[in-house]
Amino acid sequence: MSPRLKAAACCLASALLFLPAFVTSRSGAQGRDAAVTRQAWTLDEAVAALSLQPRDAYLQYVVLQLARRAGRFDEIEPRVRRLVGSEVDMRAERRRGVDLFSLFTGALAVQESLQL
């Protein structure tokens, strides 16, 4: 094989390898956009998910970002604050669950030893 023929074959093979990188098909691009939009959350869906799991930091972030993008941040932000609650509320909830009598008397150990 002559050097010119080898060079031409090499150029042709390179062009065929890199051609898909430069040419995008319209159906492929539309298919990717449709797949992304089917998986993306709307603001209402994210708020509904946050109402089910209010302490999920990722959902809080998603809701606030979607609200900012939709121009509804001032409307959504107080709702998120009410759902999340404050640190004082969390402390009060933990404090209500403490039973000091059971903690210091060893009642659980007695129950376990008696298998009640």
Image: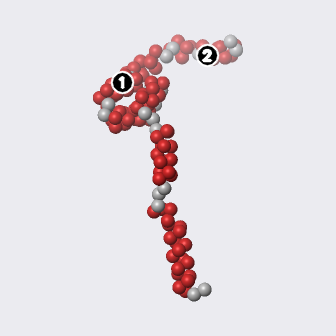
Residue 33 picture location, percent across and down: 46, 46
When asked about the image quadrant of residue 114, the answer is: top right
What residue is shown at x 53% (from left), y 80% (from top)?
8
Tell whether 74 sits left or right of 66: left
**Distance in Å between CA atoms under marks 1 and 2:** 41 Å
Residue 64 picture location, percent across and down: 36, 33
Residue 43 picture location, percent across and down: 40, 31
Residue at far right of view: 115
Q: Is any atom of residue 60 visible in this view? A: no
What residue is pinned by disc 2? 108
When asked about the image quadrant of residue 48, the answer is: top left
User: Considering only order in the chain, which callout, 2 or 1, is on the residue closer to the N terminus?
Assistant: 1
When asked about the image quadrant of residue 109, the answer is: top right
For mark 2, give the secondary structure: helix
Q: Callout 1: few (<14), some (14-19), or many (20+) C-alpha neighbours within 10 Å?
A: few
Q: Amino acid at mark 2?
A: Leu
Up/down of 32 relative to 15, above or below: above
Q: Callout 2: few (<14), some (14-19), or many (20+) C-alpha neighbours within 10 Å?
A: few
Residue at far left of view: 74
What residue is shown at x 60% (from left), y 86% (from top)?
1
Q: Which mark is residue 99?
A: none
Q: Is the Cβ of the residue at disc 1 closer than 8 Å to that at disc 2?
A: no
Q: Is any atom of residue 27 visible in this view? A: yes
Up/down of 72 relative to 20, above or below: above
What residue is pinned by disc 1? 79
Please name whichever residue, 59 or 42, is drawn nearer the observer in this view of the structure: 42
Quarter of the image that includes the C terminus: top right
For mark 1, give the secondary structure: helix
Residue 78 picture location, percent across and down: 33, 25
Q: Amino acid at mark 1?
A: Arg
